[in-house]
Image: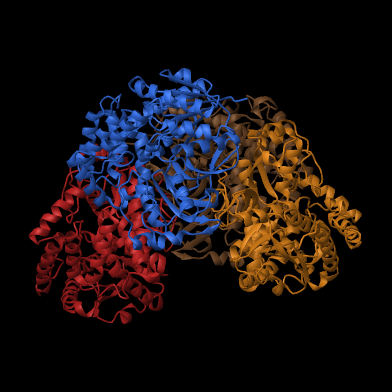
Chain colours: A red, B blue, C orange, D brown
């Protein structure tokens, strides 16, 4: 008897077909009976396209899962077992705005970190906390799987300001599992990876193939082959890599290669074609395919979108929670001492055990100073960002930006912030303001 | 019966007359019988000038203190009670080299932080550890007061790699005491300041005049009047200051106003007149005055040199240790948990109690994220710098520079390092090298 | 112009004349204009006697301090500058009850620790928190100096459950200063002692005479000469003392010599003459002297009472807070990391700096396992005791007693608790009860 | 191709047939080719009997495993893959001596805790560290599975004083898994238990059946049915259990029911029939069965010996390490912050992940004060015991015993220690002695 109700908030996202595919593939162990796709009025058209495709996919796969598309979030959430959030407040237009605004001020514009990620976090956190209030009321036992970026910051906001059972998820870790499995020609179960860090700033301090450490294979002569698609490819200096003693993730380049990435982005900016423009084009193409009634499966073109294996990670985790099967997943959870150089109440992304309806981090041991220093300052930025989003204090926002390694001064932070307030006027409500008690 | 033997290593420094003056002024409580001024062959001429002045000052003050100038460090150290180190490995020429090399690569060139301070640390640590070996052998009970910059890093190296009783000292804290005393028209004993941080990155989280907190006086509308002389004057943004919730020290500008300071320095660099050039000129003028047989006291011109009240801080501390008088001094010591977000074994600069022949930090309480993040990343840089100086591993040096907030990428760090090795060839011996086990 | 208002709650205590004497002796630096003596109806007669004596003492000393005796606590507290609490809920009769009840069950009966101290804490905490509510309302800026035993537990309850500025005080530390000063024939200012621990379980890990460590003098061959008057004298085994590496305080005997002390107490119990009986007799004699109109000063007989130098410690501290004079006092404050093996929010008794209207603990460094183990288990008992007093949960009370080292089993703890509920019926209101949600 | 070499030190133990049975049962996944049984000269006879039985068992099971019995430990260890230690220094006679000596002094005599466990630890640690030296030399890659009691203390000694990859193992956790599986009629894989603590002092803070917490089933009304065989059965007070908020292990009774257990043991002592006597009798009977050539399997009588499921736990763990299969095992490992209220370098017994040739503890979260206090004091005793065994300092031994909750005073500890030195003369070599530097 199939009985699970899954709610996907941001159901009109181009990623949804991946999720549907994943649920279909796990249909034998994951007894899903209903999938509710929720979106907002502005996303209605996309929602309809996705819902149509989802229904065709379900039919094609011959599963008995009911697809419900709706703009009524509260109706959808009622008695949900699992909620998946993949929203984009302000949609791709605001992503573009974020990138252009940042680059206009001469700083890196990126969706999840720096000035760009900061704006996205400030737009998104209030909406996510609203969703969590609904979950607390309508489906208090549900697990929330958050994909919404910046996933670590959003998850930390929820961990600190709601009682929802939340876990944050990114495709970055699973991509490394996939890559190593492919590189060493072994099944994924024979790959084991030690991650230390936070979402999008996560170091691999060792990895094992069939229980044997192979880190030195990479440190000794790796090419940049393990990079994600959405990060400009630049090779690592071998001396840098060896002395780091760890494999950086793709997003580390914004920190370790700041000047080069910035130059590249400024070049695109001048040409008027940034990553956001590229994504908008891909999205447009994707929806054309999705809309085609002959599309019955997730199209291959989706892989160019940059979120490869997102749904595999998500559905694996969902299955693991449902079966309570003591599997290890690399996900975003409350620290609780697992990384001892970070505060207990912050969100980290490390290997966790899914057991007893809990997702518990495994101890990471000591962190070397070269990793620790960067990790701590970026985490402090994240803590301040969460605080700024919740308290709406402009001063806290200013402090967050100022200590971010990609922002070169408090003055620049201030100027950025002034422009951000204008560009995000519709979303930073009640607005962050200057003066009075809100400093 | 006067009996203390004080040894000043780097006795030919232009700061020495300040120390002599301080010792004269405390002659009634500090029973000094001998001051040995030690320098190296290259500093011989300056040493002779300083020794001559010191003797005239002592005579003028009618104290019975013997001044001995020598190039024989080991003879000087024998049975010393206090050793003061104020050396400059490579002298002012290398300071100039540090500044120009940094600016050539487009990064801030500064004596104590960033690329400049890094080179100075790498030149200085091996020499200081040699001195400490001598102290361990020849004067194991002596206290070492270290002024040598970067004072926090040097002191950390000694705390970690020798058994000498060391304390690091900077004039930055005493300048704030002086400033607040003047601003509020009270004697210094009525001023009390809470410092959190490390040398040259030290926040004032509160201060009190006659036991009453006055922090908000400054946060609400301070001008930049509390700045030290050797830091370009730029005002703080009031919103920034209020949300920081603390008063930054002068050196914070390199971090909070990186782009502006860099622009200003590059401008001077193009003109061929940086801070090092300015200091060289001041030094030249000072020694002309020192040499004049009619100079019997510390000349007023010394204040322009930037180390105002250094000697007052030093002699106060020396007196306090000698009397074991339970006074509070803001100095550089082993953390031991006083700042709980930093490792126990690092060097911090906070209020300490001088008691029982020990200098013990007072608990600082929680540190806000805006302070914590920057403090942690710079401290991690310092830990790596000490490690690089001791292990001579080029990889560790690369990691140190890479995570420093003033260095924009690992590539830039690598390029800087290559140039540094050449410029410091005479001092980084045995050299840091690329490749092999020394990564 | 004298202007401080001091309120002594429990003003009818036999210790009050000591306090009055102390205030008189510090009259030149401590500008006291009013002392309010507050007591409850049952203590009215004693209050009148004490007030009479206090007035004669003030007159004799020719100070212009007004003494006001009252049963109206709220009137007294209004605009107080300092509040001193030295109450005994249930008076000496309940102390006697505590001792006899404990010994009846075959466990040590002592006023501040074990089953006796536990009952006293449970009777006292609710009353003290009531007093604190009044202070918060009527004198929010006042400092509370708490003498009431068990002083560490009471102070912890206030630190955790009120906003009053509180510091706990015991005469144990000052007694060691006095003793060492006498032993080494130096003034007290030349004695410096390192304490680690909590009230009545406080180890001296080193002490210094004129800045020179003398701990080994004691470890190598000390007699038990440093004992307080109210603790049965038993010598320490020299091998024990040397391997402990620290000097225990008098109250350690209850833990280190449990079987011997218990045998001795049971012997007194059978004779019907315990410490409580002895104290009652001393008190009776004291009040006879106090009542005598010819008594114009604190009588010598008070020293037998066991609280020697209590008032000296108190008035010194009060003066230090008033002058904000950066002195060191060994008092009971919030841990905040000063003893890193204990939770941050518990009360500890260590050297503290009185500065900036704050009393801040000085870092204690590492604690050896022989000290750590006992310290941690007794502190856990104290935390549970505070929790039991505030939540009124019988289960928490049971856990507190069970882990106390002087209680031999959970069964014995349960039996004790049942008797305690009966004996303290008038004070444990609303009573701790068995069953329901209050487990 | 079967190829693993397993060495069992203490191969003549009556537990060995269990291990052999376990290895046989896992023969399909664990490719064992050789089992070496090592014992000392005094155990030769037993070794021969066990080796004979082992060979019959292997033959009966039709496995191709070679059994080698030897007194040459070094030959056996050469190139071993796994070493299992289950030695008893001084054999059962010394266990009897431990129990009688303790009870003679009126304290609990028990094999693993209190005075008895202390003597066993001091006899065993030097021998185990000798074995580890051999392993470091002859089989540096081997894993050591230590069963030898007191397993937590022995494992901590090895973790601190050798480089061998060690894990300590006890049957206590697996017994709880078995019990809950049986109680709830589910397979063991559906049981999940959260343990917090150290070996033989391990609390169950929650447990789950098919992912659903069932702790309250036990707290609300459990009988003592989950007790191990070798601990006298006494029921828990329900109020105690509920307020504890956790299920104690069998060995907690020595701490929570000290007076009752002591009374019971003293009674047996007077009768001259303690647990040691009982075990000696069981052993005698077991070897009679083992010797019988018709015995081809592990006899049922072994279960009375008290170590039920020891071998299942061991062989499961061994298989898990060999397969590197990311399973959870409750074993004794270095803390590393998993229980944040204990030092990092001590041994704890918690759920661990076997992955990447490492056994990593999973974070346990906060520990309530009622658990924390007892845990910390017993762990401090264990740390001191390890230190005493390694440094041979009598003073450290005295401190260890003094703070142990089952020892009523330093005087009693001293008296016990004097008797221990005589009784263990043959084993405490070089002896712990009184006086000189060894205090």
| Displayed quadrant of residue A105 | bottom left
D403 horizontally vs A256: left or right: right
Residue at the spot 27% in from the left edge and 24% down from the top edge:
B426
Residue at the spot 24% in from the left edge and 35% down from the top edge:
B417
Locate the N terminus of chain C and report the quarter of the image it occupies.
Answer: bottom right
Count how many numbered circles sit on residues in the image.
Answer: 0
Residue at the spot 17% in from the left edge and 70% down from the top edge:
A93
- Image coordinates of residue A170 in percent, x first then y, are 28, 59
> Is D53 situated above or below B33?
below
User: Residue A264 or C18: which is nearer the viewer?
Assistant: C18
> Is D63 situated above or below A340?
above
B385 horizontally vs B59: left or right: left
Locate the C terminus of chain C and report the quarter of the image it occupies.
Answer: bottom right
| Displayed quadrant of residue A119 | bottom left
> Is D88 situated above or below B41?
below
> Is D393 situated above or below B413?
above
Residue at far front of view: B294
Res C282 visible: yes
Res D404 visible: no
- Image coordinates of residue A341 in percent, x first then y, are 41, 49
- Image coordinates of residue B40 in percent, x first then y, are 37, 21
User: Residue C196 or A82: which is nearer the viewer?
Assistant: C196
Residue at far left of view: A271
Residue at the spot 35% in from the left edge and 72% down from the top edge:
A129
- Image coordinates of residue A384 in percent, x first then y, are 36, 61
D201 horizontally vs A280: left or right: right
User: Residue A132 or D325: which is nearer the viewer?
Assistant: A132
B48 horizontally vs B97: left or right: right
| Displayed quadrant of residue A169 | bottom left
């Amino acid at each position: 008897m199939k009985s699970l109700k899954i709610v996907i908030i941001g159901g009109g996202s181009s990623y949804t077909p991946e999720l549907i595919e994943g649920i279909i593939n796990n249909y034998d162990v994951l007894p899903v009976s209903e999938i509710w796709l929720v979106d907002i009025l502005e996303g209605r058209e996309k929602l309809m396209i996705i819902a149509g495709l989802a229904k065709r996919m379900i039919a094609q796969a011959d599963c008995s899962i009911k697809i419900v598309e709706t703009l009524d979030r509260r109706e959808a959430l009622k008695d949900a077992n699992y909620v998946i959030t993949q929203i984009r407040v302000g949609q791709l237009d605001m992503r573009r705005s974020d990138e252009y605004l940042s680059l206009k001020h001469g700083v890196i514009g990126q969706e999840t970190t720096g000035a760009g990620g900061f704006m996205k976090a400030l737009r998104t956190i209030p909406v996510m906390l609203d969703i969590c209030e609904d979950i607390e009321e309508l489906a208090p036992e549900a697990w929330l799987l958050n994909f919404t970026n910046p996933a670590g910051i959003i998850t930390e906001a929820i961990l600190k300001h709601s009682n929802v059972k939340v876990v944050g998820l990114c495709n970055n870790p699973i991509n490394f599992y996939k890559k190593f499995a492919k590189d060493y020609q072994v099944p994924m179960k024979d790959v084991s990876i030690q991650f230390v860090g936070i979402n999008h700033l996560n170091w691999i301090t060792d990895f094992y193939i069939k229980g044997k450490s192979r880190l030195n294979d990479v440190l000794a002569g790796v090419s940049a082959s393990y990079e994600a698609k959405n990060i400009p490819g630049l090779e690592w200096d071998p001396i840098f890599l060896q002395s780091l003693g760890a494999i950086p993730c793709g997003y580390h380049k914004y920190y370790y290669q700041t000047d080069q990435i910035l130059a590249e982005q400024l070049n695109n900016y001048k040409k008027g074609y940034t990553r956001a423009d590229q994504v908008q084009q891909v999205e447009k193409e994707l929806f054309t395919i999705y809309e085609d009634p002959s599309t019955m499966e997730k199209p291959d073109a989706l892989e160019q979108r940059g979120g490869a294996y997102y749904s595999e990670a998500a559905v694996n985790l969902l299955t693991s929670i449902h079966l309570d099967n003591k599997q290890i997943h690399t996900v975003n959870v409350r620290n609780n001492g697992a990384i001892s150089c970070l505060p207990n109440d912050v969100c980290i992304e490390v290997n966790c055990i899914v057991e007893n309806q809990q997702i518990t981090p495994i101890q990471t041991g000591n962190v070397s100073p070269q990793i620790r220093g960067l990790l701590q300052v970026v985490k402090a930025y994240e803590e301040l960002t969460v605080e700024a989003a919740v308290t709406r204090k402009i001063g806290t926002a200013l402090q967050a930006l100022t200590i971010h390694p990609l922002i070169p001064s408090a003055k620049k932070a201030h100027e950025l912030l002034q422009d951000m307030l204008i560009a995000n006027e519709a979303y930073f409500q009640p607005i962050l303001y200057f003066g009075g008690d809100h400093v």
